[in-house]
Image (cartoon, rainbow, N blue to C red):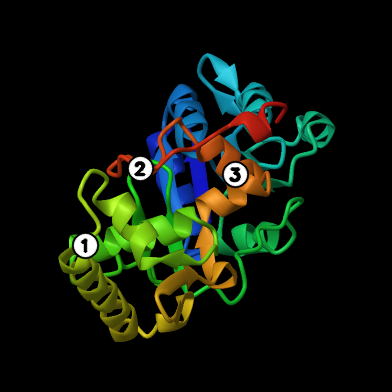
Amino acid sequence: MKILAVDDEALALEMLTEAIEEAVPDAELKAFRKPSELLAEAKANGCDIAFLDIHMRGTTGVELAKNLKEVNPKMNIIFVTGFDEYTGDAMRLHASGYILKPVTAEKIAEEMADLRFPIEPKSGALLKVQCFGNFDVFTPDGKPLRFERSKSKEVFAYLVHRRGSSCSIKEIAAALFEDMPYDKKQQAYVQKIMSALMKSLKQAGVEKVVNKSYNSLSVNTDLLDCDYYRFRELDAGAVNAYQNEYMEQYYWADFYLDDYADF
């Protein structure tokens, strides 16, 4: 869950962030004193919930909310203010909530329990997979998964890219070593890489994410919470997070937008 917060008063912003951190300790939180910086972050990396002070220099939280809704119509907007005269504007924007200062963790928790657009992490996922930008894999507690070999991480990336399709040793070799001949030596090397991959997954207790059979591997997509898969399902947060970068460290990784041209 990603939360952004803005208030141009330093003390008020500190109180807001402390309340959010107490109420939602596992969330990724970024705080800003400039509305333009929050908007830029939302455009670049997406956002699930935005806490916006209404009275700010040069603009209002209501105007900022209008811009954020253009970025992601399903973003949860929660206004924070010392006044209640903007309640009507907030409702017309389909805001998720409205908190009167002083902000407390209890008030934050109440709004989080009744979001207009509930945030539902994929149930049963054993790994969180990031494909946009550089490819990375994380355990549910947010720690990077350690791969014994860099090539075994690349194999896993290729399996994720294939979205559950079974991949033979020869197919994987062709992806990893594009211009090299496929012979017994290369076959044996790829098998070592695959074994290293399974060892890394087993050490993390997540070996079930890969289906292994004779001469082939595939990922169990049901056990992955993946931004690429969410994008294909037209999840608004994943769509906004995509910035024309997909598994940047791998030359074979192609991402086609043709199927999503109208989104």
How much space separates mark 3 and mark 1, taking CA atoms?
44 Å
Nearer-N-terminus badge (1/2): 1
Q: Nearer the viewer, mark 3 or mark 1?
A: 1
| Residue that badge 2 annotates | 252
Q: Residue at x 63, y 38 (%)?
A: 82
Q: Is residue 211 above or below residue 58?
A: below
Q: Label 2 sits on what residue type?
A: Trp
Question: Whole-percent x and y of residue 222?
Answer: 60, 70
Question: Whole-percent x and y of residue 236?
Answer: 65, 42
Q: Label 3 sits on what residue type?
A: Gly
Dot label at residue 260? none
Q: Residue at x 72, y 47 (%)?
A: 97
Give the structural element (helix, strand or loop) at label 2.
Answer: loop
Q: Callout 2: few (<14), some (14-19), or many (20+) C-alpha neighbours within 10 Å?
A: some
Give the structural element (helix, strand or loop) at label 1.
Answer: loop
Nearer-N-terminus badge (3/1): 1
Give the structural element (helix, strand or loop) at label 3.
Answer: helix
How much space separates mark 3 and mark 2, taking CA atoms?
25 Å
Question: Seen in the image, is 237 located left or right of residue 96?
Answer: left
Pick the residue in front: 29 or 227.
227
| Residue that badge 1 annotates | 183
Question: Seen in the image, is 156 located left or right of residue 73?
Answer: left
Nearer-N-terminus badge (3/2): 3
Q: Is residue 134 above or below residue 112?
A: above
Q: Residue 134 appears in which quarter of the rendering?
A: top left
Q: Label 1 sits on what residue type?
A: Asp
| Residue that badge 3 annotates | 237
